[in-house]
Amino acid sequence: MAVTVGQQTPLVVLDEGDRIVGVGPGAESRFGPLLGEIVWDCYPGSEALFKPHYDAARTSGEQVEFAQFYDGNVVRVRAVPGTGGRLELYWQRLGRLDTLTLESLLETLEESLEMLAVESSAAERAGARRALRLVEGGGR
């Protein structure tokens, strides 16, 4: 899942039922064998974390970018709606928990929490910017 968010080829493409229908070259080894499977069945516990963002992208028709922690990784995900209810997904791994020692676990956990806080703040600022609208001719 270490692919830059700006990459042109999606890592994974889901259909309207969240079935994996496309896999980019950067994800063939991990997702290729899962073609045709519902993504939530393959990654237990991930539906509650990712699906609301995927649904928001489909509903709004606009890309949604967010950071999430799952399976020891902090990732930035970009969900881009396509035609026919399809959803193109791009990931960038921001961090990973190191469980080799208790000390390294604590250190990487603190780093992961900090990354998520920074990402959350950036997302809130971006959302506020999108919500601002210029209204002409109101001031005297």
Image (tube, rainbow, N blue to C red):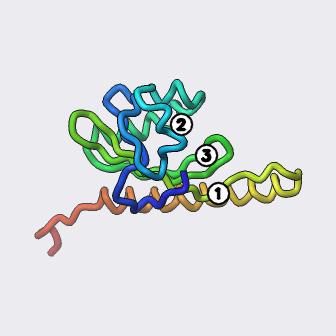
Q: 109 or 99: which is nearer to us?
A: 99
Label 2 and label 3: CA atoms lie apart by: 8 Å
Q: Which mark is residue 69?
A: 3
Name the residue: 57% across, 31% down. Answer: 43
Q: Which mark is residue 49?
A: 2
Circle 1: residue type: Gly
Q: Dot 1: few (<14), some (14–19), or many (≥20) neighbours within 10 Å?
A: many
Name the residue: 45% across, 26% down. Answer: 37
Name the residue: 47% across, 38% down. Answer: 32
Report the side of 125 relative to 70 (left or right): left
Where residue 97 appears, as percent x and y from the top left, is 73, 51
Mark 2 or 3, nearer chain start: 2
Label 1 and label 3: CA atoms lie apart by: 9 Å
Helix, strand, or loop for circle 2?
A: helix
Where residue 86 appears, as percent x and y from the top left, is 29, 37
Q: Which mark is residue 95?
A: 1
Check the image and report above or below for 140 versus 93: below
